[in-house]
Each structure stands twice: as C-alpha cells, then as structure tokens.
Image (cartoon, rainbow, N blue to C red):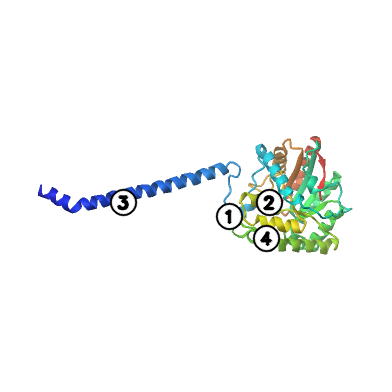
Amino acid sequence: MLLLKFIKKHFTNSFNLIKSIAAGLFILISTVALSIFIMLNFQFIKKPLYKNINLATTDKIHWVDKTKIPSINRSVLDRIEYNHSHFISELNTVITEDAKIKNSITIENALIRDGKKIAYLTFDDGPSTTVTPKILSTLKKYNINATFFLIGQNINQNPQSKELVNNIYNDGNSIGNHTYTHNLKKLYPNNRIDVDYFMGEVDKTNYTLREVLGNNFRTRLLRLPGGYMSRSYYHDPNLTELNKRLKEENLFSVDWNAYDFDAEGKKKNSKELLQMVKTSVGNNPKVIILMHDTYGKEETANALPDIIEYLRSKNYEFKTLQ
Ligand SMILES: [Zn+2]
C-alpha cells in the first residue's frame, strides 16, 4: 500500500507525460505514413507510361520516352501537335525553300490528318563514318529521302564526316540540328534546360553546318536530345523560356511518334528493330520515325531495307521534313 501511494504521488505526472509523448509519436508516424502513401500513389499513377526511369539520373533522360507503347500513340501525337502549335500561331517568317530537299513537307503540315499515309524517316546522332554511308545508300536504292538530325561535334570529327554531311544534303535529304555535344548533363543540368547554354550549342552546330554546306544553309528543324517530350515530362521550369527563344530564332522542335527502339535496352538485331517499327507505327497515318545512324548502329542500317519495304506494303509515302 505504501508503495502504491508512493507511485501515485511521484509518477502521476510522468504517466501523463508518457501519454502525451505516445500521442505525439502516433500523430507523427501517421503523418509520415500518409505522406509516403500519397507519394507512392503519385508515382504509381505515372509509372505505367514511364517505367524503368531513374528520375535522378540525367543520363537516362535521353530515353525517358517510353511513350511509343501503341496504346498511347494517340496522346503522343497530340503532344507533338500541341508542341508545334506553340510556335505556329506567331510564325511570321518566310520558310526558306531549299531546292535540294526532295519531297518535303513543312513541319506545320507534317501531321495534318488529310487521309494520306506518310512516313518521315528521321535519323539522329550522326553523321558516323560507319553507319551513315549505309543508310544513304539504302535510301538511294529505294529512291526515297529522310531527315537527319546531326550532332555538331560529329560533323567536325574528321574530313569524312564533313563529306558525309555534303552527301546527305546533295542526295536531297533534309538536315536538322541536334545540338553540338548531345551532353545531357551540360544541356540539362539538374534536369533543367540551361537555355543560354543550349542555344549556344544550337548556334555552334548551325555555324558548323554553314561551314560545310555554305553560308546560305538554314534549317528550322531542331530535335532536343531526349526529345521535347522528355522536358515536358519532367515539367522543366525553363521550357517557357526555351519556347520563347525557339520562336525568336524560328526554330521548330520536332519529336517523334514511332521508332525502331535502336538506342534503348539491350542491343537488338534487325528483325527486332523492324518489329518495333511495326508495333510503334500501328495504324497511325502520319508517322515520324526515330532511328539512329551513329556509331554502333549497324543493325539499324541492316534493318532499314525491311523497314522501308514494310512501310511501302502498308501504303506509306516517304517524305522529308522542312
Ligand atoms: Zn540523340
């Protein structure tokens, strides 16, 4: 009894304190658990379209675009059209018609739904002395043309690379700008586009192109490394500034809505590349197909004849972008 009295007297306050601490901890743990639950759900909602992306790794940004799963082709197309509409509304410049470019359609009209089936073959990251010549020879053989988004430093790599740019151009293909270094860490530090630096690389590549093709050369076509859609996906806060600069300089960002998947995951053979084109093209009447003609993409060159024949069998016409 004495002991009980002693406890009551000296520990009642402590019991209350423990109760308060317990209640405090409970609230804290509940809040944390609820936050984690909300965050996980947020990720879960986004994940089906963009799985396998490590958001923290800038190196992976280039291949964020998992959007070519056929079921969401339509939304990708919408996004491309939307991206373009940014710039079309206030476009007031004369489009430089270049006599050399064959079978071209202006980027504003590229995806218009007019009942025609058109495939725009696009090759990124070149020129390379190993793959580009094979691509050019296949295009010639089938008497069609494509659009090449070139990296400035690859043009400057050696005299043969410069000669290849001349060949691309003289064969009637279209040429677009794909920055000078393609270095994602420099272009998108902390996953945000550094607009001044980015436009500096674009200018440098344009300068390089003019050195090779002559001072009159102009291109309105720009493909962002990783695609404009990856910047949108990351809600890049500097995109508004980029849009403004592109409009000022009359440049159009051109993404894609189909691809051969030749730059992602495990290396694929030409049959697998063809299959990826078939799957991503689906029944879409207007397709801008992303492929690569840089070093190591021999299988893309090997797949190209089959890709062209497949698209022809599906009644696609081949056009270049301008
Ligand atoms: Zn690229």
Label 2: few (<14), some or many (≥20) within 10 Å?
many
Camera-nearest residue between 302 and 233: 233
Residue holding disc 1:
57
CB contact under 8 Å: marks 2 and 3: no
Residue holding disc 4:
195
Viewer-nearest of discs 4 and 1: 4
What amino acid type should be assigned to the residue bearing mark 1?
Thr
Give the alpha-carbon distance from disc 1 to disc 2, as whole Å.
18 Å
- Does label 1 point to a residue whose CB lies under 8 Å from ligand 1? no
Viewer-nearest of discs 2 and 3: 3
Residue at (67%, 38%) from the top-left corner? Answer: 70
Residue holding disc 2:
228
In the picture, the disc for residue 100 is: none
The answer to which quarter of the image holds residue 294 is bottom right
- Kind of element beneath mark 1: loop
Give the alpha-carbon distance from disc 2 to disc 3, as whole Å.
51 Å
The reply to whether residue 178 is in sight is no
**Picture coordinates of residue 303 (x, y %)?**
75, 43
The reply to whether residue 2 is in sight is yes
Looking at marks 1 and 2 on the same chain, the residue that comes earlier in the sequence is marked by: 1
Residue 249 drawn above or below residue 275: below
The answer to which quarter of the image holds residue 170 is bottom right
**Picture coordinates of residue 116 (x, y %)?**
81, 37
- Name the residue furthest right: 99
Residue at (31%, 51%) from the top-left corner? Answer: 21
- Kind of element beneath mark 2: helix
Label 1: few (<14), some or many (≥20) within 10 Å?
few
What amino acid type should be assigned to the residue bearing mark 3?
Ile
Residue holding disc 3:
21
Camera-nearest residue between 134 and 101: 101
CB contact under 8 Å: marks 4 and 1: no
